[in-house]
Amino acid sequence: DAAVNPGNSGGPLINLQGEVVGINTAIVGASFQGVSFAIPSGIAQDVYARLRKEGQFVRGWLGVALEEITPQRATDLSVPREGVLVTDVVGEPARRAGIRPGDIVLSWNSEEVSSPAELSWKVASTASGSTAAITLRRSGTELKLEVLVGERRL
């Protein structure tokens, strides 16, 4: 927990051992309200190294809108509370792979996913242009598809 005040954005977030653990980026609201955000230092280092080496930063992209499967949503859909619900297909990588709204993503490259943020991170960390294995549930049936990962430039 760290208080970040206006004007601290871009500054280091330091732990009790004096190590930089993040870069302060934003505060919620027009004035300090006790909620602030930071980019983890490991991510900042990766972005810096790739920008320096390649002159650009590219993340993997799937092209789906996602929703967490809450207990209520699982009841509404009559599905187990596992995976991540695809609510919309907004990009070619997902469309070409055959992913549809209503599909439930269970794993990405054989690693289980349990939240939209987790799946988004796994996709973003996958090299664009590579092929990824995705396991999903559609109408009670488990499917395994291959996705040609798209490119999202940052």
Image (spheres, helix red, strand yellow):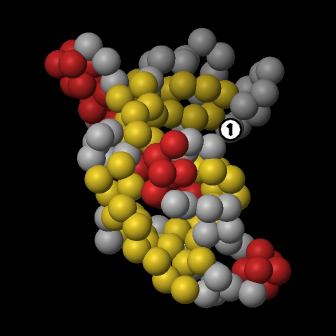
Specify the amino acid type for callout 1. Val
Q: Quadrant of residue 91?
A: top right
Q: Quadrant of residue 133?
A: bottom left
Under circle 1, the secondary element is: loop
Residue 152, given in percent of the width and then of the height, sits at: 44, 31
Residue identifier under label 1: 35
Residue 79, given in percent of the width and then of the height, sits at: 68, 85
Q: Which residue is depicted at the point 37% across and 46% down? A: 149
Q: Report crowding for label 1: few under 14, some 14 to 19, many 20 or more residues within 10 A (C-alpha).
A: some
Q: Residue furthest left?
A: 53
Q: Is residue 140 above or below residue 57?
A: below
Residue 38, given in percent of the width and then of the height, sits at: 50, 33
Q: Which residue is depicted at the point 59% across and 71% down? A: 104
- Residue nearest the viewer, comparing 17 with 145: 145
Using the rendered image of the protein, determine whether residue 13 is visible from the camera's viewpoint.
no
Using the rendered image of the protein, determine whether residue 131 is visible from the camera's viewpoint.
yes
Q: Which residue is depicted at the point 32% across and 47% down? A: 126
- Residue nearest the viewer, comparing 14 with 93: 93
Q: Is residue 89 above or below residue 138?
A: above
Q: Quadrant of the N terminus?
A: top right
53 sits left or right of 72 in the view: left
Q: Is residue 104 above or below residue 33?
A: below
